[in-house]
Image: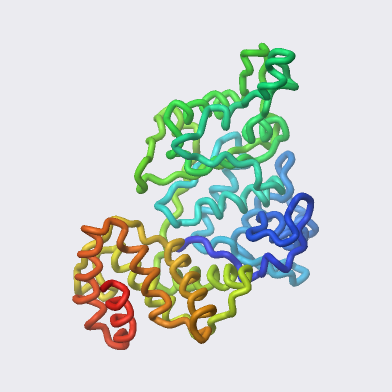
């Protein structure tokens, strides 16, 4: 099993539309991959649920990649079990909400964004979950100037992304659901079970129209997690996104994503950097698993998650160092500092874990002498 991968398509080559800035640092999925979505829609002759831009089959093809009958190549957005994607897409075609669950770095947000873009053509209806997310972010708020001047009215009401999605029959995303306080989470129960959002101040309600769906993401590994109530969890169909199954799969994911980010930031390509990417991925996988790849040596695991997303960040940072302060070739010294920062989150405990791993594993590994020296230098 493996996780998501950004395609090698350069999003900066796609002309932004509507309100998208001319040089957006990170275009929305529906803008970055507009050509692919248009090509799929043109050749998609399968039944579509109400207000869907594509059929469920085409949505799955958009995420998993493929070649259309006219030769158009659809780049993969997710690399992993096809059945997981099919379950996720079919859930959105019912009246059930979808919960993408997994440890940090398994591309839950990436998958939810592309699902919304393919289903509704709009991935911007978003509630970002934090410890400070208020109930108004899920239900509705008020324009207080209008409220004081004219009293409660629909003109004074400020709809949340969830309310807008219900009224428009669109897909709304709730990111990091378990970071939202429990009492605010439970404001979703009526919305998901009754498909209505009461507005008691006006004696009215908003009813969800056909096409409305909700995608939430959550993990239970980070600090500050608020467990979902059993009543709320029952309203979701849960799909667990796994970590990459093999080193090769994770190396491919990191390489593709770094290439895409590097081009969007105008960083030069590093064709000779695959060895350093493999080293970063190997280190992260071994420390995550608590054992070396050959199964012979047990190692301690640090407090951090060391996810695929963090490996991408380390390599991207190393690529920037190589481009601006080196000769453009990604080397051990360019990624060493990033690895240290990713591994050592708790200065006391994690530093001991890292030093023991360097001496017991990296130092003895053939062909890793330069990597060992670079890591020792930044750890000193």
* Residue 35 x, y percent position in the rendering: 75, 62
Query: Image point 37% across, 74% down: which residue?
Result: 336
Query: Image point 47% across, 31% down: which residue?
Result: 185
**Does 286 sit above or below residue 374?**
above
Quadrant in the picture for the C terminus: bottom left
* Residue 52 x, y percent position in the rendering: 72, 44
**Does 247 sit above or below residue 108?**
below
Left or right, residue 234 beside residue 40: left
Query: Image point 62% across, 25% down: which residue?
Result: 141
Q: Quadrant of residue 147?
A: top right
**Does 193 sit above or below residue 282?**
above
Left or right, residue 331 beside residue 292: right
174 or 135, nearer to the observer: 135
Left or right, residue 349 beside residue 238: left
Quadrant in the picture for the N terminus: bottom left
Residue 168 shows up from this direction: yes
Residue 1 shows up from this direction: no
Query: Image point 65% across, 47% down: which residue?
Result: 123
* Residue 144 x, y percent position in the rendering: 66, 22
* Colour pattern of the rendering: rainbow
Total number of numbered labels?
0
* Residue 258 x, y percent position in the rendering: 53, 70
380 or 75, nearer to the observer: 380
């Amino acid at each position: 099993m493996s996780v998501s991968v950004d395609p090698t398509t350069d999003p900066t080559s796609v002309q932004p539309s509507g309100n998208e800035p001319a040089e957006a640092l990170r275009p929305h999925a529906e803008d970055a991959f507009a050509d692919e979505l248009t090509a799929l829609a043109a050749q998609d002759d399968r039944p579509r649920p109400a207000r869907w831009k594509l059929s469920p089959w085409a949505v799955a093809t958009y995420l998993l990649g493929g070649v259309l009958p006219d030769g158009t190549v659809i780049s993969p957005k997710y690399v992993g079990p096809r059945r997981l994607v099919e379950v996720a897409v079919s859930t959105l075609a019912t009246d059930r909400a979808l919960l993408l669950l997994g440890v940090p770095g398994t591309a839950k947000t990436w998958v939810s964004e592309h699902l919304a873009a393919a289903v509704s053509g709009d991935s911007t209806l978003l509630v970002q979950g934090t410890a400070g997310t208020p109930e108004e972010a899920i239900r509705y708020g008020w324009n207080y100037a209008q409220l004081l001047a004219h009293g409660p009215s629909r003109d004074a009401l400020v709809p949340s992304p969830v309310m807008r999605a219900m009224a428009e029959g669109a897909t709304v995303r709730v990111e990091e659901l378990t970071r939202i306080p429990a009492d605010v989470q439970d404001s979703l129960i009526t919305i998901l079970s009754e498909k209505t959002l009461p507005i008691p101040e006006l004696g009215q309600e908003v009813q969800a129209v056909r096409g409305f769906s909700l995608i939430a993401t959550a993990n239970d590994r980070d600090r500050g997690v608020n467990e979902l109530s059993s009543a709320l969890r029952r309203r979701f169909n849960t799909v667990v996104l796994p970590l990459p199954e093999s080193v090769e799969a994770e190396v491919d994911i990191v390489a593709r994503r770094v290439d895409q980010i590097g081009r969007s930031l105008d960083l030069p390509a590093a064709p000779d950097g695959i060895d350093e990417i493999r080293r970063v991925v190997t280190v992260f996988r071994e420390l995550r698993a608590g054992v070396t790849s050959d199964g012979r040596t047990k190692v301690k695991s640090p407090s951090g998650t060391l996810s695929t997303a963090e490996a991408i960040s380390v390599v991207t940072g190393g690529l920037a160092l190589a481009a601006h302060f080196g000769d453009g070739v990604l080397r051990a010294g360019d990624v060493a500092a990033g690895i240290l920062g990713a591994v050592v989150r708790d200065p006391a405990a994690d530093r001991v874990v890292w030093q023991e791993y360097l001496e017991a594993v990296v130092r003895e590994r053939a062909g890793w002498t330069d990597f060992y020296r670079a890591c020792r230098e930044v750890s000193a």
